[in-house]
Image (cartoon, helix red, strand yellow):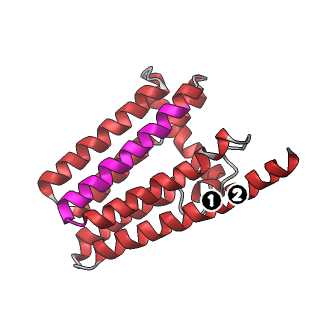
């Protein structure tokens, strides 16, 4: 939702930040892979230092780098269906790594699992429709999309590190999971509407 509303503001920022990567000759898929690598590294370090504030800040930087692959693709003319698929799959692994690290450090495995499942189902609810009917990949302006999830997780970690409140992390993960599943239901409702219309046309 944020990405759709602020696209005209956000995209020029990504374009400028991506220029050094383009000049270095990196491909979009290389940037995607490097983004995953950064997230794995900062998550592994979190298992060691267990400082939520440090993890939240370093994770924000890693996710910002990961977001540059699309800008690199546009500037180099190397956009591809394989690249889009690779990026989507890497996104899911990134969420698994981050929520797995949070579950490991905090011991909140059940909430971390619910949160991860909500994100995956949200993604799948849109992807599965494309197997049945032609649909736009951008016409799904829903409540808690990936950018919102990233911002939420980073902010939750930073606040936990700054405030040290015992209830903040479990409450944050519970809200995250609830918003993910609410968004999944929102997408399921839209999917049923699209598929029902297609059934009537047949």
> If the image is split into quadrants, where does the C terminus sit?
top right
Decide if residue 140 is on the left or right side of residue 57: right
Q: Nearer the viewer, residue 148 or 61?
A: 148
Please, which residue is most extreme toward the top here? 25
Q: Secondary structure at mark 2?
A: helix
- Picture residue at 27% right of the left edge, 79% below the top: 167
Q: Determine crowd level at label 1: few under 14, some 14-19, many 20+ residues with C-alpha closer than 10 A.
A: some
Vertical placement of residue 23 versus 58, above or below: above
Specify the segment rendered in magenta.
84-108
Res 113 quadrant in image: bottom left
Residue 169 lies, in percent from the top left, at 29, 71
Res 104 quadrant in image: bottom left
Res 188 quadrant in image: bottom right
Vertical placement of residue 58 versus 171, above or below: above
Decide if residue 123 is on the left or right side of residue 61: right
Q: Determine crowd level at label 2: few under 14, some 14-19, many 20+ residues with C-alpha closer than 10 A.
A: few
Decide if residue 118 is on the left or right side of residue 55: right
Question: Can residue 68 be spotted in the picture?
Answer: no
- Picture residue at 58% right of the left edge, 59% below the top: 2
Marking on residue 192: 2
Magenta region, mostly helix, strand or loop? helix
User: How many labels, in total?
Assistant: 2
Give the labeled residue for mark 1. Answer: 188
Q: Nearer the viewer, residue 67 or 125?
A: 125
Residue 98 lies, in percent from the top left, at 31, 52
Q: Nearer the viewer, residue 87 or 185?
A: 185
The answer to whether residue 93 is magenta is yes
Is the Cβ of the residue at disc 1 closer than 8 Å to that at disc 2? yes
- Picture residue at 24% right of the left edge, 68% below the top: 161
- Picture residue at 74% right of the left edge, 51% below the top: 195
């Amino acid at each position: 939702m944020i990405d759709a509303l602020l696209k005209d503001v956000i995209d020029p920022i990504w374009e400028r930040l991506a220029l050094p990567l383009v000049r270095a000759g990196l491909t979009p898929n290389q940037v995607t892979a490097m983004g995953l690598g950064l997230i794995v590294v900062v998550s592994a370090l979190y298992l060691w230092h267990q400082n939520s504030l440090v993890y939240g800040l370093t994770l924000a930087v890693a996710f910002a780098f990961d977001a540059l692959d699309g800008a690199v693709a546009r500037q180099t003319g190397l956009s591809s269906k394989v690249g889009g698929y690779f990026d989507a799959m890497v996104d899911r692994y990134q969420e698994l790594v981050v929520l797995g690290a949070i579950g490991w450090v905090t011991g909140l495995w059940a909430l971390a699992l619910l949160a991860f499942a909500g994100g995956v189902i949200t993604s799948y609810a849109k992807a599965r429709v494309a197997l049945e009917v032609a649909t736009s990949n951008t016409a799904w302006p829903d409540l808690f999309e990936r950018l919102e999830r990233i911002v939420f997780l980073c902010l939750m970690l930073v606040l936990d590190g700054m405030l040290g409140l015992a209830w903040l992390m479990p409450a944050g993960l519970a809200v995250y999971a609830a918003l993910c599943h609410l968004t999944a239901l929102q997408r399921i409702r839209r999917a049923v509407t699209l598929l029902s219309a297609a059934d009537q046309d047949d």
